[in-house]
Image (tube, helix red, strand yellow):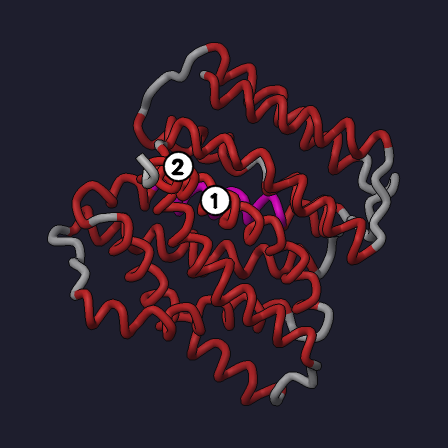
Amino acid sequence: MSIRPVTVFGPWAAGVLAIVIWGATPAATKYAVAEVDPLAVGMLRTALAGLAVAPALLLLRLPLPRDRAGWRLLLISTASGFIGFPLLFSLALAHTSTAHAALVLALAPVLTGVVGAVVERRRPGRWWWGGVAVASAGAAALILLRGQGSGEATLYGDLLALAACFAVAGGYVAGSRLSPSIGTWSVTAWGALLGCAVAVPIVVAQFAIGGWPDAGLTAWTAIGWLVLFSSLLAYVAWYWALAGGGVARISTLQFLQPAVTLLLAVVLFAETMTPAFLLSGAVILIGVAMARRG
């Protein structure tokens, strides 16, 4: 009987840990791109994560896809989640506020549903469509009201964050379709390694042309956070939480992620939360909740 509370508490604790790490990711990215070129930040994140996971791939001998369809899904997952997302999100944080990026990223579950519905040719229910409409309206208001507080938000930066959100949604859908055949761990680890193969030459070429970044301890610590925590530890904790606590229950923790990011935006960067901004954020989260119900 004494083991049961630990068993129940463990997945929730792991889920909260993952959400806190991901909630801090925009802030870490903001610190990194303040001193290092955004392209280098995005590619370093993938390159170092791939190098870190390589020993585990060799030791565990994780399987690869066995057919063309599987390889196609793995390549899409890699291109979207390990190359497109970190690159676009790093560029976004160089041109918009941490708070704006966080709320745009909150659309990821809705956009994942949109991409999944298109790929699988299915028609979701009314709640889902209503949630998509509400969340989209909130995102449009957030972008249009970008000049009314919340730091140095720009249209260009917000659109880059939205593009990053679409990229990660495509990666989620491809990865979820491949996971039943080779496993979630294989999709994640091989995606990181394949992304590393693309990112390393880009990083080497950039540093060869522009020289080693003249960045301080804060920027390099932020990059280390993105690699070790955002790209690796958070995924391990999240998948373990979903497996142990159930997808339906644990996934509700995702609503905490924007709150963590907004708190850090205020505390670390003194970004202003105007009523219009907070209302836009609330509309986005309500839309996401409606879509999840559908």
Q: Residue at coordinates 60% horizontally, 49% vertically from top-left?
A: 23
Q: Residue at coordinates 71% horizontally, 74% vertically from top-left?
A: 35
Is the residue 39 above or below the residue 19 in the image? below
How many discs appear?
2
Disc 1, SS? helix
What is the x, y in percent for residue 54? 30, 72
Q: Residue at coordinates 20% horizontally, 71% vertically from top-left?
A: 59
Q: Is residue 193 left or right of residue 166?
A: left
Outermost residue, left side: 66
Front residue (pair 157, 238): 238
Which residue is under mark 2?
5
Front residue (pair 232, 213): 232
Q: Which residues are magenta?
A: 161-173
Q: Is residue 282 left or right of residue 240?
A: right
Question: On the rendered image, what quadrant is the C terminus found in?
Answer: top left
Q: Is residue 156 visible?
A: no
Residue 79: quarter of image:
bottom left
What is the x, y in percent for residue 12? 45, 39
At label 2, which amino acid type do we have?
Pro
Question: On the rendered image, what quadrant is the N terminus found in?
Answer: top left
Which residue is under mark 1?
13
